[in-house]
Amino acid sequence: MWIWKTIADWCCEMEAYLQVLNAEQRAAVEAPDGPTLVLAGAGSGKTRVIITRISHLIHARAVSPFRILAMTFTNKAASEMKERVEQQVMSGSIDITVTTFHSFCARFLRREIDVLGRESSFAIYDASDQQQVIKRIIKKMDLNSVRYPPGRLKAIISQQKNAGEWGAKPENETERRVYEAYQEELERSNALDFDDLLVLTLRILNESEECRTRYQNRFRHILVDEYQDTNKVQLQLLKRLCGPDPNLFAVGDEDQSIYGWRGAQIENILEFNQHFPGAHVFKLERNYRSTAMILEFANRAIAANQQRNPKNLWTEAQAGAPVRQQPFNSARDEADFIARQILDLKMKKQAEFSDFAILFRSNFLSRSLEEVMRTYRIPYQLVGGTKFYDRKEIKDLLAYMRIVVNPKDWSNFERAIGIPSRGIGQKSLDTIARFFHESVNLDQAMAATICAKALSSKAHNGLESFLALYRKMSGLAESEAPSVWLAQLVQEIEYVEYLSREDELSAENRVGNIDELIASVRELEEEGTVGTLAAFLDHSALISDADQIEDKKKQVSLMTVHAAKGLEFDHVFVMGLEEGVFPNQRALDEREAALEEERRLFYVAVTRARQHLFLSYARQRQTFGNTTYGIPSRFLRKATNPETEPQPQAMLPLDLPEKSNRPLRGKTVRAGDLANHLKDLEDQMRAQNIHISLAKSEGGKTASPRFRVGQMVIHPKFGHGKIVQIAPSGTDRRIGVLFLGKGTKMFMESKAPLKPM
């Protein structure tokens, strides 16, 4: 229940809130009813606009908070948004729904899923749960896990569900069989994955007019943050929730659309007017985060993209320090420079280590960086390591919790019954599974197995003790708070002792994680966020990667650019800016749209910086056991101001075609093109100080003349290259070929698909 302030009070406060907005922000906040799109550039105060819009609806338009739904993509963002709304609107809590898409759908399905003949006690399977299900299916179907890796099958299943067509299945027969088996196991276990939350909610809204009308009447105003990250299903959900007269207030920035690989559609924001005709569109271009120098660089970096609404970020802040671009001979030199710069800036600027972030395109780049951080004794956190809820000890305890809440969850039953060991192996599990398929739930299946005396004596005794424990913990779940229940479980199964037996060295850290889990549950209970085991399981399952970034003081943050989305730091280093690394090779191989997403990712990286931005690249880098020779990323050339800033110190000319980095690919070439590529390779060799290396045969003579150092060759995949090294390898020879923009690749002569030119 919320209490209205006096008219005089809220009039004064509302005007005060509007006064702090700039003209563009205020125009967006005061937009009339109907669909509205706010194109909010990086650091332009979009969250303030959403919060003030909610206040404006409540105060100026007398909209009940009960009728407002605000959605974003992380629990952390949703929690912060609700807290700020409550502070701005009035004292005390208000009955407004601020949530994530997945959390909204989970709550929706708890209430409405019975119309599909499903049970509301469903479990929510996270990524690791899905992987385990798929691995079991691969084993059961006797598939080659190299040809059909679980991760790829999981992605195919997700893509199929997010296509927005209920019941659609993969065209490939094997993939279709896996998909069907996966869905059957989830239904048998009364479980949903993240995609199901969205898809089943949409299905109910499509099929049930009564339900659709009820929710449309409930939520008369819908606000969405990070709209550029919505996928096809989320767009359809919004259309169904908004109804024929949409009061949708969408805030986003197509220049920060970086999740195409997981289904986000940039077209949702670019074609907003087509989806919601008559929409009001506003642009927020004033930046409150970065210096002018950083913004000028960012504007140039993103300008090459075609899929965008033109925007030009500006600021009234000082120009600041120039954006610094730095080449290095090796990844080690690059990491060493970054570490020394951090120590230098920390001393000069009286900064904390938490003011620094080091961003990279892919996690493999962090290895040399971590080594140097330890050498210089710089404290750091690697964001995106093993997530808290993915740690073994946490998954073990949650498995017990899940089978109590959902007595059909076979996947977690398999995990729980083996922790600690009870003498129940795979053969015994297969026997229990047969009874499970004929039973209503796990309790009945275990009881039937025991009654039939279908197991060995040891397994029989183990199952009897587990069933007794299961029934005891199920009873406690009805009367005890989740934190008390967890503590009791740890004691009942003697889990601390089990960890000590398994690995005494790691036991202390693992026990610390268990204490942290119980403490976090207790904290959520005190906040009123969770009161039951089911509520806590929903909370833990719906936590995103961004929610798990630790807010630790006095630590440098090392993270991928994707993980840095939505964050900001005083001093930012973006490393590994080489062709094939950033942009990555996949983007260079695919269509222009993939390269544009890479450029948006680069734009996100540089706009994380408030005061200082350092960009670096290495001439030589060890990747996956191979030495590669790189050239500066094309993004650097595009963003560099030729009138005031030096061009990146190229190891190769940077006038490469924007659409692809693949050099010629063995196609017919003009003489002029070939001459240019020869010159480019020679320039690359000189810039990188690559010396020709020719090993002698045992007789002291030059090796076989089929290939020789300095010779030009062509490869069906990598295109044209120059042999820079030949060395004996047993009865064969290893040949090193430098390819334009691809670095040096090594081949065994007998198997090398190389043709002399």
Image (cartoon, grey):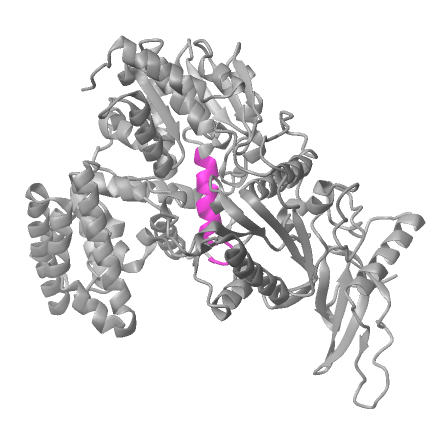
Tell me the quadrant of the picture where the N terminus can be found.
top left
User: Is 534 displayed left or right of 176 in the figure?
Assistant: left
**Position of 396 compared to 193: left or right?**
left
Magenta: main secondary structure equals helix
Q: Residue at x 37, y 43 (%)?
A: 547
Q: Work out whether 280 lies above or below 456.
A: above
Residue 661 percent across, percent down from the top left: 73, 48
The residue lying at 24 percent from left, 54 percent from top is 516
Residue at the image position 39 percent from the left and 18 percent from the top:
16
Q: Looking at the image, which is closer to me, 335 or 467?
A: 335
Displayed quadrant of residue 303: top right
Residue 383 shows in the view: no
- Judge whether residue 133 is colored magenta: no
Q: Residue 316's x, y, as percent?
A: 59, 30
Q: Position of residue 199 (x, y in %)?
A: 38, 30
The spot of residue 502 in percent (x, y) is 25, 71
Instruction: State whether residue 120 is above or below residue 442.
Output: above
Establish if 30 lies above or below 384. Answer: above
Examine the rendering and report whether any part of residue 391 can be seen.
yes
The residue drawn where x is 36% and y is 35% is 196
The number of callouts visible is 0
* Residue 157 drawn in magenta: yes
Quadrant in which the C terminus is drawn: bottom right
Nearest the camera: 91 or 423? 91
The segment highlighted magenta reads 144-161
